[in-house]
């Protein structure tokens, strides 16, 4: 069974630009969560999608948004990039909502210059 | 109150020794406590998880000890191996609609020396 696939693996963007990251969950998994990982703040929850609906949201500004498609693939978008948005963005998939095991992808390393 | 406090920040253990990482939480509504292992350049991988209705769970060399009254839980790695050198994160989540949100500790960088 293929794992969680995140693309691209690496990105370099300029301040003010926007970026879209993609996540394909494990086949059959319908819940996708996004996390931001930085050395200073650690792992922080961004949002979760299930059945194309955002079910939960972390404390991030509105510049961070996401969506989920009918095939459970998810994208997150960051607009008006700031230097502080440089981070590893991780996607986790679960079979469904609830306290089930979350499987993480390898992440997308975003660098804002 | 959603904090999960993790210690130590870093840990050096000799091969064959026991590695112990501790976490403490504040929110008594948390009911799921996983531990994740992360190697450089990789995403976190679930090692072992526990719920508050048990005090200990063991899987191979990895054991979680859980103290509900103290609101603390710890990871014990027995017979630590160089391949265990990684960063370990404890986490917690609540039931129901907010269960998707894992609140992570700050991580412990473990180095197992020969």
Image: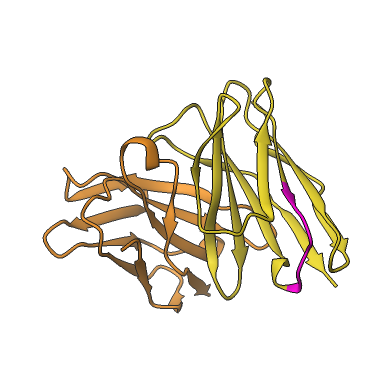
Chain colours: A yellow, B orange
Relative to B24, does residue B48 appear above or below in the rendering?
above
Residue ID at (87%, 63%):
A13
* Stretch of the chain drawn in magenta: A77-83
Residue ID at (15%, 65%):
B70
In the image, is A81 to the left or to the right of B107? Answer: right
Of B78 and B96, nearer the camera is B96
Direction front: furthest residue: A62
Direction left: furthest residue: B69
- Give the total number of marks visible in the rendering: 0
The image quadrant that residue B54 belongs to is top left
- Asked whether residue B77 is drawn in magenta, I would say no
In the image, is B37 to the left or to the right of B91? Answer: right
Of A80 and B11, nearer the camera is A80
The location of residue A77, given as percent across then percent down, is 74, 48
The image quadrant that residue B76 belongs to is bottom left
The location of residue B80, given as percent across then percent down, is 43, 64
């Amino acid at each position: 069974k293929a794992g969680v696939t995140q693309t691209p693996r690496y990105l370099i963007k300029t301040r003010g630009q926007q970026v879209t990251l993609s996540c394909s969950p494990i086949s059959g998994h319908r819940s996708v969560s996004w996390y931001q990982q930085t050395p200073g703040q650690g792992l922080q929850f961004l949002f979760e999608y299930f059945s194309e609906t955002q079910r939960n949201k972390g404390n991030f500004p509105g510049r961070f948004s996401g969506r989920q498609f009918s095939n459970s693939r998810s994208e997150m978008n960051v607009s008006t990039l700031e230097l502080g948005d440089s981070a590893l963005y991780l996607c986790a998939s679960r079979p469904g909502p609830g306290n089930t095991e979350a499987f993480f992808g390898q992440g997308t390393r975003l660098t804002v210059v | 109150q959603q904090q999960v406090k993790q210690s130590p920040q870093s840990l050096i253990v000799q091969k064959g020794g026991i590695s112990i990482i501790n976490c403490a939480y504040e929110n008594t509504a948390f009911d799921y406590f996983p531990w994740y292992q992360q190697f450089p350049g990789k995403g976190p991988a679930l090692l072992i998880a526990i719920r508050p209705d048990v005090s200990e769970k063991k899987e191979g060399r990895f054991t979680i000890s859980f103290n509900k009254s103290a609101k603390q839980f710890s990871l014990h790695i027995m017979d630590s191996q160089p391949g265990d050198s990684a960063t370990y994160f404890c986490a917690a989540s609540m039931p129901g609609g907010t269960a998707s949100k894992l609140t992570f500790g700050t991580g412990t960088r473990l180095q197992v020396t020969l």
